[in-house]
Image (spheres, rainbow, N blue to C red):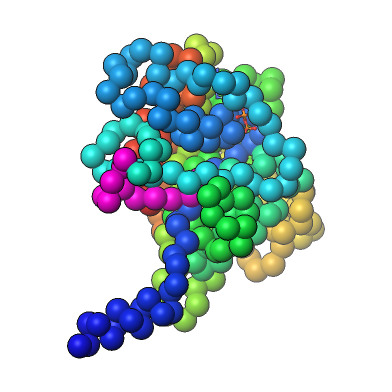
Amino acid sequence: FFPILLHLLFSATTPYTTLPSVLLIGPSGAGKTALLTLFERGPLYTPDQPTSADKPSVSTPVARTHTSQVPSTVELAVSPDSTTFRTDLDAAGATAKKFLLVDTPGHPKLRGHALSQLSASSPTITPSTISATSSETHKSKLKALVFVTDAAALADPDSGALAATAEYLYEVLLALQRRFHSRSGSRAPASVPVLVAANKLDLFTALPAALVKSHLEGELTRIRKARSKGLLSTEEGEGEGAVGGEEGEGWLGAYGTERFSFKEMMEFDVEVEVVGGNVLGEGPGADKWWNWIGERV
Ligand code: GDP
């Protein structure tokens, strides 16, 4: 009797559940839309196709770029016994975990919206265009974050991509760090792991993932130093001016360390991993990213 009552109670209070979500974030041009499209159209490549064949290619142009402020969302399913991406939701079976992949605009002016959602104790996002469901907006629990970078642009010192990418990543990681302090009551904030996807490894000019990692860590160190100096003098940092406030608030990672390392983010329950891949062309492809996501949704 008791379990039945519990069941009734549970189903009465939760008439439906919104799928958890994974947020795609990063500077524009890094390949977020291309990646979303690749995952969405996954069934075009049957999983038993030889992996070396033309797998990462996408049959239709993927160079759509966002012009709207509305993030685009796709519903995907990851099956524990599949090592490549597929989205045949029905065929995926009962063991498949469904989730929403939400793309965000990379334009600096539109970033505030994406960032503002990350500092909550249990971050949720409101995906606005969920295919096949009603247009009602439900809040979806944020499970993980994929920060997409252009590893070829990062290799080019004249492009300014390293500084721009690190600046954005700094904001993202700082927002997640703040989330750690915004705990409500005794409940620990939900952990939000971050995958830094070093994209475009099909290009021979691209930096390998290990170098993307060390370059970003170096640049984040530089930004952190510059900001802490800015904080001491004027309270007014560059940009949106959200750096002021308590001592150390704009400081990313462990306080007082000389060089920033992604490992420091573990103090705030933020796991950061840098993994290389590519959406187009020949290369390692996107499977590792897919598996990373699958392990965290
Ligand atoms: P977004 O602004 O982050 O959504 O970036 P897009 O998805 O619009 O991609 C920007 C450009 O990079 C497009 O021209 C894509 O075709 C290209 N692109 C995306 N992924 C790859 C990749 O893995 N390799 C190469 N060579 N180009 C890519």
Pick the quarter of the image with the N terminus.
Answer: bottom left
- Is residue 133 a member of the stretch shown in magenta? no
Tell me: residue 210, above or below residue 130: above
The residue at the point 47 percent across, 61 percent down is 18
Residue placed most toward the observer, 100 or 170: 100
Tell me: residue 44, above or below residue 6: above
State the image coordinates of residue 222 (x, y, percent, origin top left): 61, 40
| Image-quadrant location for residue 108 | top right
Tell me: residue 287, above or below residue 56: below
State the image coordinates of residue 57 (x, y, percent, origin top left): 47, 18
Q: Left or right? Give the position of 34 relative to 144.
A: right
The residue at the point 53 percent across, 50 percent down is 132
Residue placed most toward the observer, 51 or 251: 51
State the image coordinates of residue 223 (x, y, percent, origin top left): 64, 43
Residue placed most toward the observer, 283 or 238: 283
Q: Which residues are magenta?
A: 91-101
State the image coordinates of residue 201 (x, y, percent, origin top left): 47, 20
Q: Quadrant of ligand 1?
A: top right
The residue at the point 45 percent across, 67 percent down is 16
Determine if residue 54 is in view: yes
Q: Left or right? Give the position of 154 relative to 111.
A: left
Determine if residue 216 is in view: no
Q: How many marks?
A: 0
The residue at the point 43 percent across, 79 percent down is 13
